[in-house]
DNA sequence: AATGAATGAGGTTTCATTCAT
DNA sequence: AATGAATGAAACCTCATTCAT
């Protein structure tokens, strides 16, 4: 039935509208000061309507954050190659951060907001059922794997414990992003933030790279 | 008068009871879900009574956070010596974190919670009036100074920009702590967290140390 | 859509219900002892529901008072004619008071309550921005104009200073009404009050009329 | 016992201190925004101590107002002579208002504040037990008597109903005073207020005087 | 006599969520 | 599918009054 199809399409469209609106409001005002009423009003919908598309506020936010996470992880995945050395891979990871932030700071910021809401992830890994691996955990696993590779191929410090260092890196990255997310939107000076990210990543890169590695890889370019 | 003295002591005791209770509740449930009612009930006091000791909720929390901040900064200050090289000084800073956390994790956690509440500090430094320098900013300045010293004495990477890297370090440290603070209290495994802190600090230490420095200083001991 | 129309009507009806209830409670108990809870309970609504119709308590009250003020001023305006002498006009003003009070004492009482809440008007006139002239000030201006007219046409005492006497008259009238408003509702004997108003107005009328005026105009009829 | 005497004196002194303080605060900020705490603090006493001298807040205020009322009525009584004509007597009453206000505006203002708090007096006269005649009612009776005298001696309008007109006059006077009392203390321009009082009283004087009276008595002098 | 800690009822406002229409 | 009215719990704060000391 064409009608059913159309309805389906419209439903998806409305859902997106809600998510887009919520995202914009959160980025503008911070997650804590956005109410369901705000979202509804901005969508030109009723508050009740939101509950037709999302079970509750938490579910709405969760989807928003999942979305951002997926996009980012997808982005990184595309750029990673199995042939990369560990050092190259972690470098790619961070360049992806910087690139994605440069293109659409929204995604990165939302990624940070999620962290700020939810309980601390890395410590909770064990608790999570294996089935529904959340985005942050996927990212954590990705980092773990990259580190292991780097240790194996000699581009990263041999003494690193991949699992533990992955958490560290995850948290450092998360920390920067949360700080950005907390900035009132009108103060988010992207150039400054990019430089901040670069500084941070370069320090950590030097901190985990093997002394024998190609030193030129320890610098991250910002175009 | 003994009576007046006693009353004074009791008043201070009650005040402390309130602060202690608030602290415990915040550490247990997170700052956002602690209400004045909760604090009052746990103290076996009426809500109104809280307002005899604190002007308002914000003042109560402020005192709590300021307390933690002061203790920590005091602790660090005592351990720093003007004769230390920059590298030694930053090492002392981090060992202080680890030590204070080991002795009284509350202080460190509260320090983190405060960060999580306030807007992102490093970016806002310029705005703050010089008069009432808040604890986080005092810390930031301390880090800046240490970095400058280390660059001057050749123990830290010459290429570092002290102001920018201070922010980075501040955020990294803050990030770890916030993550800890977000953990539900029953999951805070202190041994694990201590190892985490150590890992992080060692990575950053390697990342900012000068290649010519004494390599033995790049390892942080945990007793 | 009939449905939309109906909803609109019902909304307006509820709004009126709230206003009516608030008005009744204020008239019964005095404005200071009426709470949002009282109003809600009497309406068989939840407290929260009131905030769907009014931004806050002040807005609710403001509407109530503005309503009463507008009705009264409208009433007077209709009865005034530019051909009236000053004496006739001021007579019309007072007859309007008496008539409106006779028909709906609520309006007059509310007009008085408003005065009792706000800081003393006549002295503050200068401060008010010209844009949003409040009802009491509109009334004051109206009196001023009438007085000026009466002095010009010889029906009022030549020695009167219109501006100052307008304040006086405003206050005398306000005073009576406030006194009425303060009466517990069960003691408001309308007949007595009407006679009181009549006495007062006649005294002032004699006090401001020119000796040459038509003496028959110095008596106010009560039907 | 000298000691008992001294204690008594001190008790009376404290009581006065409390009353004086309360009066000052009320005159400054308005009766509604003065709390027991304010009074206590300003007295450098504890809140509890106030309750040693007064049963409750209402009693404290009542005394304050009674005080002002007594002083004023005393003042008027001294100036009234049984030989005065009615017109002269009412003139004396109003000149007393003006004089007392000129000397100590506090008394007059408090007299007004009381009115603003209590339910409307004139209408309640009948209800009051004859025993403890309150100040406002004493004033009302005084006016009644003066009016009767004036009607009898031909200096006031024969057609006046003394009881009813007394209420009227009482309310007009009260109205002015209440308006003054409501003014924030920093806006009380005594000269302006004196002129206002004069204007009002002269109007009413003309309104109640007999046409045959001595016209020179219809003007009130302000020195 | 005086203190001052404590109470408890009351006040306004916000917001996620439900549900009849 | 959508509305929007309504709820009810929760939040922060104030203040007259009481009472053990």
Image: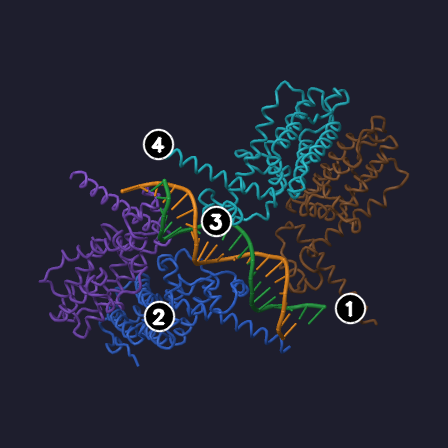
Chain colours: A purple, B blue, C cyan, D brown, E green, F orange
Q: Which mark is residue B185?
A: 2
Q: Chain of mark 4?
A: C
Residue A63 as seen in the image, left or right of residue B51: left
The quarter of the picture where residue C159 lies is top right
The quarter of the picture where residue D38 lies is bottom right
Q: Nearer the viewer, mark 4 or mark 1?
A: 4
Q: Nearer the viewer, mark 2 or mark 4?
A: 4
Q: Which residue is mark 1?
A: D7
Toward the bottom, the furthest residue is: B223
Q: Chain of mark 1?
A: D
Toward the left, the furthest residue is: A83
Q: Could you tell me if residue C157 is visible in this image?
A: no
Q: Secondary structure at mark 3?
A: helix
Q: Nearer the viewer, mark 3 or mark 2?
A: 3
Residue A139 as seen in the image, left or right of residue B49: left
Quadrant of image for the C terminus of chain D: top right
Quadrant of image for the N terminus of chain D: bottom right
Task: Give a yes or no on whether discs 4 and 1 share a subunit.
Answer: no
**Number of numbered discs overlaid on the protein picture:** 4
Q: Could you tell me if residue B205 is visible in this image?
A: yes
Q: Secondary structure at mark 1?
A: helix
Q: Residue C209: x, y in percent?
A: 74, 25
Q: CA distance from mark 1 to mark 3?
A: 53 Å
Q: Nearer the viewer, mark 1 or mark 3?
A: 3
> Badges 2 and 4: C-beta atoms under 8 Å apart?
no
Q: CA distance from mark 2 to mark 1?
A: 60 Å
Q: Is residue B2 above or below residue C190?
A: below
Q: Residue B155: x, y in percent?
A: 28, 72
Q: Which mark is residue C47?
A: 3
Q: Which mark is residue C1?
A: 4
Q: CA distance from mark 3 to mark 2?
A: 37 Å
């Amino acid at each position: 039935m064409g009608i059913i199809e159309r309805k389906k399409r419209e439903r998806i469209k409305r859902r997106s509208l809600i998510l887009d609106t919520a995202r914009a409001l959160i980025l503008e005002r911070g997650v804590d000061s956005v109410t369901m009423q705000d979202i509804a009003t901005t969508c030109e919908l009723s508050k009740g309507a939101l509950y037709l598309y999302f079970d509750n506020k938490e579910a709405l936010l969760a989807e928003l954050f999942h979305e951002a996470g997926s996009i980012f992880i997808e982005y990184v995945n595309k750029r990673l190659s199995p042939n990369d050395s560990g050092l190259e891979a972690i470098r790619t990871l961070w360049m992806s951060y910087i690139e994605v932030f440069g293109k659409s700071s929204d995604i990165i910021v939302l990624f940070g907001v999620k962290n700020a809401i939810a309980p601390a992830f890395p410590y909770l890994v064990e608790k999570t059922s294996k089935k529904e691996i959340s985005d942050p955990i996927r990212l954590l696993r990705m980092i773990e794997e990259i580190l292991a590779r780097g240790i194996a191929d000699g581009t990263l410090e041999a003494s690193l414990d991949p699992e533990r260092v992955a958490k560290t890196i995850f948290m450092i990255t998360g920390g920067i992003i949360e700080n950005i997310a907390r900035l009132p939107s009108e103060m988010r000076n992207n150039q400054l933030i990019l430089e901040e990210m670069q500084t941070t990543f370069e320090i950590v890169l030097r901190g985990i790279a093997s002394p024998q590695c190609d030193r030129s890889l320890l610098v991250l370019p910002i175009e």
